[in-house]
Image (cartoon, grey):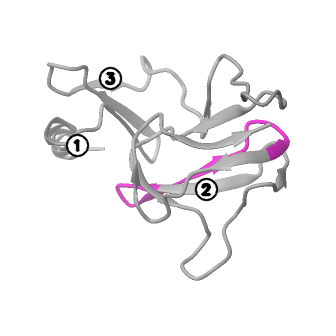
Amino acid sequence: MDLSKIKTLIDFVGRSNITELTVTEKDVTVRIFRTPGQGASATPASEAPETTDTVVSGRDASSADGQAPAFPVRAPVFGVLHRSPAPGQEPFIGVGDTVEEGQTLFIIEAMKVFNTITAPRAGRIMRLTEIDGGEVETGAVLAEIA
């Protein structure tokens, strides 16, 4: 990845409301992040932590009606959420569906890169975001699996 492309990505993060962006091209990964009140900065891949397709909260969220604990599936990146593999097709999952660990739940499109969001564990979908074709923020809860 050339320096002009990295500078363009840094400028993009600086102008937008996203706080972190990870881009991989060939064998180079660049992680750009911003903390409140600061501009964007880039971290070489060797210093950046590994990222995964899904982020699971460290604690269980249990529902008020005494059902089994639900584990949130969060958006790992800012982007456009797609609930189906292509326009006009059935969504990957629905409320009440049983999913297996590693099963595709969503796709998030970020800078023309399609990130597959998979189930971090097996279980039943208890809640599901209504967003489809709209933007989601990093860390937004997309679904809950019990």
Task: Kindly identify the amino acid type of the residue bearing the numbered disc 3.
Answer: Thr
Label 1, label 2: how far apart the Cα atoms are = 25 Å
Task: Kindly identify the amino acid type of the residue bearing the numbered disc 1.
Answer: Leu
Circle 1 — which element?
helix
Residue 117, horizontal then vertical, whole percent: 62, 48
Q: Residue at x 30, y 27 (%)?
A: 33
**Residue 110, magenta (yes or no):** yes
| Circle 1 or circle 2, nearest the eye | 2
Q: Quadrant of residue 55?
A: top right
Circle 2 — which element?
strand
Vertical position of residue 62 compared to residue 121: above or below: above
Circle 3 — which element?
strand
* Residue 146 - label: none
Q: The C terminus lies in which quarter of the figure?
A: top right
Prevailing SS of the magenta stretch: strand
Residue 100, horizontal then vertical, whole percent: 85, 47
Task: Kindly identify the amino acid type of the residue bearing the numbered disc 2.
Answer: Phe
Q: As drawn, which residue projects farthest toward the bottom?
A: 88
| Stretch of the chain drawn in magenta | 109-124
In this figure, which residue is indicated by the disc labeled 2? 106
